[in-house]
Amino acid sequence: MCDDDLIPPRPDLSEEQWLRAEPELADGSVGDRVRAMSTVRRRALLGGAAAGAALAVLPGTAAAGARTPQAVRPRAAAVDTFPFPERPNSDGEFAILVTGDAGTGEEEQHAVAAAAREVCRREGIGLAVGLGDNIYENGPESDTDSEFQTKFEEPNTGIDIPWLMVLGNHDCSGLIPGSGGDPSRGDREVSYARSSRRWYMPSRYYTAALPAGGTDPVIEFFALDTNPVASTVAQLDPHYYWNGPYMRAQRAWLDGALGASRARWKVVIGHHPYLNNGKHGSAGTYDGFLIGHYTRGIHLKELYEEVVVGRADLILSGHDHTLQLLEPTTRTAGTRQIVCGASSKSGDGKAHANHPATWQNFSDHGFMVLKVSDRAMTVDAYTVDVPTRTARLAHTTRTTTPVHAREAEPAGAARG
């Protein structure tokens, strides 16, 4: 079984319970992962004990109660990062590359990036989005892990723009690859942003708007960390419980940020989708589970439905290795779900649900381009032929009325 396809036998097991329930997982790559994690944790404990003893003799040190991210070290200064666009391209639009589930370092990732590089040049793209699973299969081991180079920097050479990055389940693996069982590992990717010109992740969740420095943005992105409410295992750290302090703070932040935004177009980006016709399924029934706080993603479903739908124009997600432009519906209060997770891996070739779709593809690799102006928002979906590293424009959809403006529309008004 591929690591990416690991599904627990029952909902909401801890990783240790899962391994006891399926001891055959101790063989092969998962067993290697368990042994490697044990070694790392022993070293961390020894190092932490020594550091704690040193801190204890320093005046003014308050170590108790602090949540120090593992493997995050302060840096003297940030690098000279690629700038956010301050003005639209020659077509009068802000163009944004959208990729997801890219970080394998394999030929497929390089082929998609090469095809996207040409489209970026042609379309005047000034910003990119990475929808999680940035470092397969287990996430980085530190903020200086060489995999940042081989699975992000090198494939994306020449796409010299800021990349808005969010955390995926593989970025926060615990013992089991892709489990999302150790959210604290995501702090390493936040820390890496200090040393990369491309990688933009100022926090685990954040906002970013275009044009840079504008008071009334054309578009604003709201980047989420969906892992604590969509992991395939139960969270053991109370800080990351589905109803713990981290998720309460993130929910309050998202609610406030969406309400305060003055952007024409509002886009929520997070790894796990709200709606999805691919094999992982939709929030609330992930991977066919109908019970369980974590495994089925019921609390992520609640977050999307209670805070996001009807307020954001798009939800951009990865997780499923497919390309989907789903239709805005009454259920979504006009918000459109987009799944774009085929930038290195591809799907199984078939739909597993029947949410209304404008266009969808379950077989090919690819990426998307989002283009916005005050007049319209357009999404171009591209498929990529890996052997030739070429992209084909497969579908375009255009919207002219933002969600927040639709309540003011006269009855019968046409929508894009």
Image (tube, helix red, strand yellow):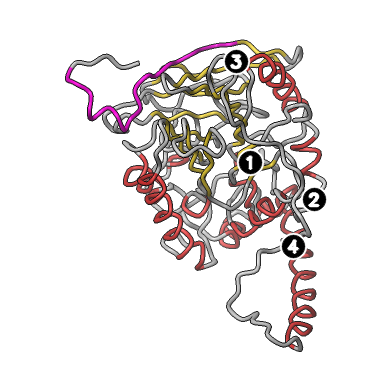
Q: Nearer the viewer, residue 403 or 154?
A: 403
On whether residue 36 falls in the magenta region, the answer is: no
Amino acid carrying mark 1 in the image: Asp
Q: Are marks 4 and 3 in contact (CB under 8 Å)?
A: no
| Chain-order first, disc 1 or disc 4 | 4
Label 1 neighbourhood size at 10 Å, few (<14), some (14-19), many (20+)?
many
Q: Nearer the viewer, mark 2 or mark 3?
A: 3
| Chain-order first, disc 1 or disc 2 | 1
Residue at disc 2, secondary structure: loop
Q: Which mark is residue 6?
A: none
| Location of mark 2 (residue) | 145
Q: Nearer the viewer, mark 4 or mark 2?
A: 4
Amino acid carrying mark 3 in the image: Ser
Residue at disc 1, secondary structure: loop
| Location of mark 3 (residue) | 90
Residue at disc 3, secondary structure: loop
| Location of mark 1 (residue) | 133
Q: Are marks 4 and 2 in contact (CB under 8 Å)?
A: no
Residue at disc 4, secondary structure: loop
Query: In terms of image quadrants, where is residue 38?
Result: bottom right
Q: Cα distance, mark 4 to mark 2?
A: 15 Å
Q: Is residue 131 above or below residue 345?
A: below
Please report the residue visible at 23 percent of the width from the left and 23 percent of the height from the top.
409
| Chain-order first, disc 4 or disc 3 | 4
Label 2 neighbourhood size at 10 Å, few (<14), some (14-19), many (20+)?
some
Q: Is residue 363 above or below residue 6?
A: above
Query: In terms of image quadrants, where is residue 168?
Result: top right
Could you tell me residue 229's position as x and y percent? 46, 52
Q: Which mark is residue 74?
A: 4
